[in-house]
Image: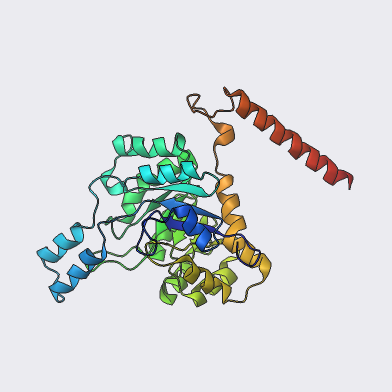
Amino acid sequence: MIDGIKIFDAHMHIIGRFKKREQSLADYLDQYGIDKAVITSLNTKASLNSIAALSNFNGELNSSAKEQFDKFRMKEQYEHKEVLNIIRENPDRFVGFFWFNPKIAKRNDEHYTLLEKYLKEYDFKGVKTQWNVDNLTIKDFEELAEFLIEKDVPLFFHTGYPFAFQRPIRAKDIRKFVKKYPALKVIVGHAAFTMEHCIDVLMFLKDCSNVYFETSISVPYGIGTLIKAMGNHRVIFGSDSPSATTPDIEINKIRILNLDKETLEKVFYNKLLTFLVNNSDFFKINDLNKSFNWRSDKLAYKIELKMLYWTLLAFSQSNNS
């Protein structure tokens, strides 16, 4: 919490250059006044050394350069065991998003089986993608979109500048995609990473009501423009820390905009929390093998009844006043 405003970070990795290895992620949140965070894995192959090695090609996009790019890419799905462990240690502070590469997956194969396990059994709340590093085209998202609509799970769609050999995925491409899948909830990551990109986002995505806009690594003026044009209910704070930066830098980009408190509350916490909680499957669980299941667990059933009782009591008191 900063200045009496809770902060829910929509984009955080479990490790990175800007966090000491011995520091727990919960302590990292405390250091920067963050109450809760969406966390995911990290592609550790895209290290400083491997990225710096690209400078040796002196502008030549030859086969050796492409091989260096290929070293960034995971041949299997990203590992999320540590993400799960962190959530289990602090379930009230962390929400899991599964970083998924749809290019190497086919519907109903082992990749989708693994993804479904994390969503259903481990209660991960969303899926992150990174089209640049995983070399995705917009077509690679189609099966994943159908799967996520079926599961009622949001998609975090990383946006950014393409590598030299890639065809870019621009806002106009995302528009066609989300218009094709209007039931899919999409969070556009780095929505204002340049003003040119921000303007494209404004032009092509404003009328796409299923799209939200995340602020990490964005230009402050662009963030302010998104809030004004899209509405504060559609702009979600994220830091992309500790891999790309530190949370205070990203928080201050929004604080310097001189926004009113209600807008700050909606951007920093309230709407993201509502967005995720409304997609929770706690009360619609069908898997009776879950360790905490309201249909078979007496404690869970008792908790649900008490929640219902106090909710009804609150409503009755509100109506009497």
- The location of residue 92, given as percent across then percent down, is 55, 46
Residue occupying image coordinates x 21% and y 64%: 50
Identify the residue shown where x is 56% and y is 32%.
284
Is the residue 142 above or below the residue 251 in the image?
above
Q: Residue furthest front?
A: 22
Given the current orientation, which residue lies at the most extreme left position?
Answer: 63
The quarter holding residue 302 reads top right
Q: Residue at (67%, 65%) from the top-left corner?
A: 262
Residue 208 visible in the picture? no
Give residue 221's position: percent from left, percent from top. Answer: 51, 77
Q: How many marks?
A: 0
Left or right, residue 109 beside residue 305:
left
State how the image is colored: rainbow
Residue, x 44% and y 39% (percent of image)?
A: 119
Residue closer to the observer: 307 or 277 = 307
Q: Is residue 263 above or below residue 154?
A: below
Q: Quadrant of residue 156?
A: bottom left
Q: Position of residue 175 (x, y in %)?
A: 44, 60
Q: Is residue 19 visible?
A: yes
Residue 97 image position (x, y, % from top left): 43, 48
Q: Is residue 107 left or right of 291 when viewed as pictured? A: left
Q: Is residue 194 left or right of residue 265?
A: left
Up/down of 72 relative to 181, above or below: below
Image quarter in which the N terminus is found: bottom right
List the single residue furthest toward the right: 320
Q: Is residue 45 left or right of residue 188?
A: left
